[in-house]
């Protein structure tokens, strides 16, 4: 597998991957195009990464990540910045991480995330905020983020209820709960 920057030319393949992995139309092509642009720093470094099968060129993983100053909320609309240890302007955001089922539990999610974290550190970000899906199968979202060092800030019931897509767990509307989590970048090993 290859880890590559998420570039504009990848948007359509990423859309196919997310439709299969998360649920049809969780992301639109327009959203993915916008998120790809939001993941670029002022120095033209890309903070979002894809995992690509070199033989088939299929996307097998995605880490969407936004540097400080390039975002103001996640896929849902609620943030509790008042509970964070650092300001919004000092905080990067992990939008989404998805790995193809056949590659899960092999360390690819961590590798994709650390590529983004390397850039955030160079930018001087003090923390990373994210929202994870509490009802993910076997609680994998929470376990993965906790293993990286993220701590839960607050729970948001029905976080994705206004997102127009069919949830793989409970259909439409999505009634899943988001855990808003935060990580101090300087607490991670280099």
Image (tube, helix red, strand yellow):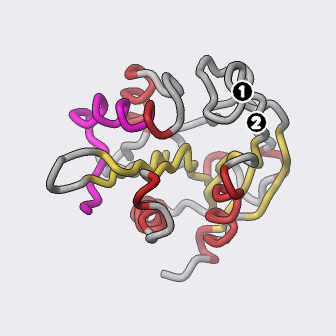
Image quarter for residue 58? Answer: top left
| Front one among 27 and 71 | 27
From this viewpoint, which residue is outermost toward the left? 55
- Which residue appears at 26% of the width and 37% of the height? 10
Q: Is residue 91 above or below residue 11?
A: below
- Which residue appears at 19% of the width and 47% of the height? 57
Majority secondary structure of magenta residues: helix
Q: Dot 1 lies on which element?
A: loop
* 54 relative position to 186: left or right: left
Q: Dot 2 lies on which element?
A: loop
Image quarter for residue 36? Answer: top left
Tag shown at residue 176:
2
* 69 relative position to 44: left or right: right
Q: Is residue 60 above or below residue 159?
A: below
Would you say residue 25 is visible in this rendering?
yes
Q: Are marks 2 and 1 in contact (CB under 8 Å)?
A: yes
Q: Which residue is disc 1 drawn over?
A: 174
* 157 relative position to 48: left or right: right
* 149 relative position to 179: left or right: left
| Front one among 28 and 46 | 28
Q: Quadrant of the N terminus?
A: bottom left
Figure label count: 2
Q: Which residues are magenta?
A: 1-18
Q: CA distance from mark 2 to mark 1?
A: 6 Å
- Which residue appears at 64% of the width and 21% of the height? 163
Q: Position of residue 181 (x, y in %)?
A: 73, 55
Q: Position of residue 114 (x, y in %)?
A: 45, 67
Q: Is residue 12 magenta?
A: yes
């Amino acid at each position: 597998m290859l880890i590559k920057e998420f570039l504009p030319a990848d948007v359509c393949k990423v859309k196919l991957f997310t439709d299969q992995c998360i649920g049809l139309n969780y992301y639109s092509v327009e959203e993915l195009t916008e998120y790809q642009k939001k993941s670029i720093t002022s120095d033209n470094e890309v903070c979002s990464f894809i995992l690509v099968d070199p033989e088939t060129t299929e996307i097998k993983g995605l880490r969407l990540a936004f540097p400080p100053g390039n975002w103001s909320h996640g896929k849902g609309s609620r943030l509790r910045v008042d509970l964070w240890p650092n300001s919004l302007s000092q905080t990067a955001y992990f939008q989404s991480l998805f790995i193809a089922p056949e590659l899960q539990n092999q360390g690819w999610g961590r590798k994709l995330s650390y590529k983004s974290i390397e850039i955030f550190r160079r930018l001087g970000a003090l923390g990373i905020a994210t929202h994870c899906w509490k009802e993910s199968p076997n609680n994998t979202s929470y376990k993965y983020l906790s293993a990286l060092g993220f701590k839960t800030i607050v729970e948001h019931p029905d976080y994705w209820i206004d997102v127009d897509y069919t949830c793989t767990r409970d259909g439409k509307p999505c009634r899943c709960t988001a855990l808003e989590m935060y990580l101090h970048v300087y607490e991670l090993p280099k």
